[in-house]
Structure formats: C-alpha cells, structure tokens
Amino acid sequence: MRKLAVYQDIKAQGKAEGIKEGEISLVLRQLKCCLGTISAEDESRISDLSVEQLEALGEALLDFSSGDDLRNWLAAQKLLLYLSLLLNRISKTANKSSQMTGRYGRLLNSL
C-alpha cells in the first residue's frame, strides 16, 4: 500500500510539472508572436511563475504592446508575491501576539 501511495505522488508531481511546462511553452510562444524576441532574463522570470500566474499572463499579454508591458507585469507579480508573504507573516505574528495576550490576561486575572 505504501508503495502505491508513493507512485501516485510521483505521478501527480509529474503531471503537475508537465502542466506547468506546457503553460510556459504556450505563454512564451504567444509572447514571441506579440512582442518578437523575449530576453533570456524575462524567459527565466516567466519560468519561475506558478501555473495560476502563467494563466493570468496568458490573458494579460493580449493587451501588451511592448517588452516594457511584460516587464511591468512581471514586476507587479513579484510585488504581489512579496506583499502576500509580508501579510502572511504579519498575520502569524498577530495570532501569536493575541495568544500571548490571552495567556498573560488569564495569568493577571488569576492574581
């Protein structure tokens, strides 16, 4: 049974990687049709995107008229990721803080 679960996990991981590679390939082809050549740096940044971001880029690129539009979109995605991570950290800190306040409040009430 354990081996079956491992094989299923490997299969699912391979499928997810295949989907991502397909999305990357499609988006790069679309960008090259719209904008011409794409720099190696931009290709690398595109390869680092999640499947959801690749799908969003596939829609957004329809409005691109230059490589600057692509770079601005990629910069915005990086900023959104950073803000998401920051908000997540703030949320965790706030939760810990409220837990500590609750503990100290009970301690003070018991005195």
Image (spheres, grey):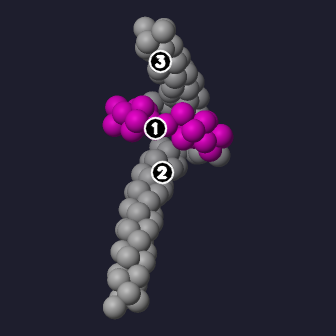
Specify the principal SS of the magenta part. helix
In the rendered structure, which segment of residues is drawn in magenta? 38-62
User: Is there a contact, CB below 8 Å, between mark 1 and mark 2?
Assistant: yes
Q: Position of residue 96 (x, y in %)?
A: 38, 68
Identity, as a three-letter code, of the amino acid under mark 1: Leu
Q: Is residue 53 visible?
A: yes
Indicate the secondary structure of the residue bearing disc 1: loop
Q: Position of residue 40 (x, y in %)?
A: 34, 31
Which label was assigned to residue 17? none
Where is mark 3, residue-wise? 9
* Closer to viewer: mark 2 or mark 3: 3
Is 48 within the magenta?
A: yes
Identify the residue at horizontal 46%, vertical 38% (top origin). 49
Identity, as a three-letter code, of the amino acid under mark 2: Gln
Q: Is residue 61 visible?
A: no
Indicate the secondary structure of the residue bearing disc 2: helix
Where is mark 2, residue-wise? 77
Picture quadrant of residue 95:
bottom left
Identify the residue at horizontal 47%, vertical 18% (top origin). 9
Which label was assigned to residue 49? 1
